[in-house]
Image: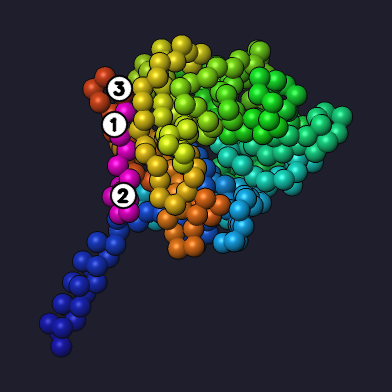
Amino acid sequence: MHLQKVLLLLFLALTASTNLRAQNPIIRDVFTADPAPLVYRDTLFLYTSHDTASVSETNYKMPDWRVYSTTDMVHWKDYGKRLSPRTFAWATGDAYAAQCVYHNGKFYWFVSTFHKKNDNSQGGAAVGVAVSDRPTGPFRDAIGKALIVNEMTKDKPHAWDDIDPTVFVDDDKQIYMYWGNGSCKWVKLKNNMTELAGPINTFMPKNYIEGLWVYKRKKLYYLVYASEGTKPEMIEYCTAPSAAGPWTYRGIIQENVPNSFTTHPGIIDYKGKSYFFYHNGALPTGGSYRRSICVDYLNYNPDGTIKPIVQTTKGVAPVK
């Protein structure tokens, strides 16, 4: 009997160790998209969109943004809904891609949603900012109005061009925000994170569509984005010697994802490894409007260029 117990315990231990490796998609009980990772102290926080469209619906239904966290890249704590367009009195419609950044002791969640018709805007996509003292909230509207409205950018005629903000704080503390569908727009922000510090600039990376992620590694700046690909989207990128460019096209790093027209990058270093977050439609009953977040390793060549992402179902190994 004692031997049987020992063997059972050994079996359970081995099973637990093999199950420790994350499985893609990493969040499996709800449909999530547009991953935005943030490392604060020893924890990785993940800010996500939330897909709630039914299987038969053919458009997005995204009522809120959610937060998750991990300390080992395998087990994820779910904080649930932490922000929605209803937080912003000026907003209406869906909760599109967003990113939370830490600056000056506070957490600023830059979101894309849609604007009500009022004295400040006649509608269309807009960028807002929420703020909190903690990475999981509660969050409130930081300025009581949109940071970017549709009327501020005129290079594209469609009303949803002001979406998918990504914010980057450079080594000299200058803050940059990039966003846009159909063209890439960027602007400097003031240190308070809620005011523009210069004119809005527009440029067009090769094959660019949307879904920006900007960061710096060593002396190189990276502009990663969802691209035209072969329709569905792929992920391509550019590099530059400064946050203002000039940007040099570097190629495709992620091919089409399973069962989703869109994909969206989120890149972070955590506990000695580099990670690439994205979404696909691989869960049962999933699809382009019922997406799920995944994470795989990101690796660099000696010259700083990014190696192609290897999409896996087994995910990444645990870290301590």
Give how far apart the Cα atoms at labels 1 and 3 are: 9 Å
Given residues 300 and 231, the one toward you in this image is 231
Q: Residues within 10 Å of mark 2 (few under 14, many from 20)?
A: some
Residue 64 in sight in this render: yes
Judged from this view, the residue extending furthest toward the left is 3
Report the residue at 56% width, 36% height from top: 99
Magenta-colored span: 306-320
The amino acid on which the numbered mark 3 sits, given as a three-letter code, is Gly
Circle 3: element type? loop
- Is residue 52 positioned above or below 116 on the image? below
Residue 307 numbered mark, or none? 1
The amino acid on which the numbered mark 1 sits, given as a three-letter code, is Lys
102 relative to 215 in the view: left or right = right
Circle 1: element type? loop
Residue at which label 3 appears? 304
Q: Are marks 2 and 3 in contact (CB under 8 Å)?
A: no
